[in-house]
Image (cartoon, rainbow, N blue to C red):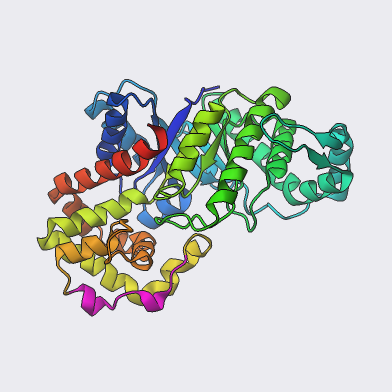
Amino acid sequence: MKQLERFSLGMGDRFAHEGKAQLQAIVEADKSGINLVPVWNKSNREHTIIKSRPDDVRVEANTAVQGLAWKGSYYVDADHIGLATVDNFISACDFFTLDVADFTGKSAPGSEIEQFVKEQGKYCGSLAIPGIPAPFEITDDLLHRAAAKFLLSIKEAGRIYRHIRERKGDNFVTEVSVDETDTPQSPIELFLILVMLAREGVPAQTIAPKFTGRFNKGVDYVGNLVQFEKEFDEDLAVISFAVRELGFPATLKLSVHSGSDKFSLYPIINRLTKKHKAGLHLKTAGTTWLEEVIGLAEAGGEGLLIAQEIYARAYPRAVELITPYAPVVDIDVSRLPAPDKVAKWSSSDFVATLRHDQSCAQYNQQFRQFIHVSFKIAAELGTRYTDALKKYSDVVARNVTGNLFSRHIMPLFR
């Protein structure tokens, strides 16, 4: 089995032009004494919209690594795949995020639930987990409820894992995603999910739970910071306990999805990973696309015109573009600027409105989230968009690298 390093950064790149700029942020981190490995990720949905293939991501990653003479590890992630989509990713990827959200909340057959409860009866009573002040009280009823909610989905994760292993051997990293669900998992539910994964023989090295609060795309966390800190602290304790109790790889770590731009959380995560001597995987899927648009707007001329055109074409298609991402955006369309107003913006106006700088009076998180889900429009522009990325590559790359290094890596890992 591939052994994932302690700290890893998932880097999405919608149009496969910023691999070198992304990796440059990892290089700068290395120079600063931060040992971090890059994981390029792209979901089947994004490939479908962009009309790209998983092999394109592997080529991008390999080209960036060769171009910067990177000697460390790196990975390509089949992001949010299931049995119906995984085969297209087998050859290109060595990191697989098993997404079982469609099965979560759907109950397994009653006989299987009863069997699980019977097997795990040893945990009934008070379960003390080091690092968590009060023991958890586990009852048959709790085991039944957890099994009814998660057992079917974890059995599906087992099927996906075994399908990949039959085709790749042990030459990959496994992540399990249970974050795209309606309600957050409590720390004891996280432990029981891990019990189910161990039972299925899935050697997960990262697990992405759903945390309390809103993890909207491209903007800061919305929620109770004190409550998040308590849950994250306890989740890290559960992870450490699961390694010893259930035989998971020592590299098992939490994964934070939609993790880009959660600036209010980074000091908490930094402090707690140090406290627990824990690892972390953070996914920053869409922030590079936003930095591309910022870079084009900042470049002015044709770059600004293309950024404005993307918005103008996206605005009347708001429902179409928002709907697939509805669980992870909060966009009040009435607060979006009119396209004719945006068409008159200067470069500095467009950049100030889009860049995630909460101290700036012009910053509009409705606009930022909307641009985040509008990459389909850029895909429809085809070579006009990608040619602009090439023409203004210097300014775009500066934004991509600076955003990842200064605003994400340093607050999280320094």
Which corner quadrant of the image does residue 126 belong to? top right
Where residue 337 sits: x, y (%)? 30, 75
Q: Residue at x 74, y 51 (%)?
A: 149
Answer above or below: position of 152 versus 170: below
Vertical side of 243 occupied by 284: above or below: below
Q: Is residue 390 left or right of residue 29?
A: left
In the image, 382 versus 253, the foreground residue is 253
> In the rendered image of this protein, does residue 215 appear above or below residue 309?
above
Q: Is residue 90 left or right of residue 193?
A: left
- Looking at the image, the residue that sits furthest to the left is 301
Query: Residue at 48% across / 68% down in the picture?
Result: 323
Residue 157, percent across and down?
65, 40
Q: In this picture, is 395 found above or below 172?
A: below
Q: Is residue 55 left or right of residue 394?
A: right
Of residue 403 and residue 249, the one placed in the foreground of this image is: 403
> In the rendered structure, does residue 100 fall within the stretch colored magenta?
no
Which residue: 67% across, 37% down?
A: 158
In the image, which residues are magenta?
A: 330-343
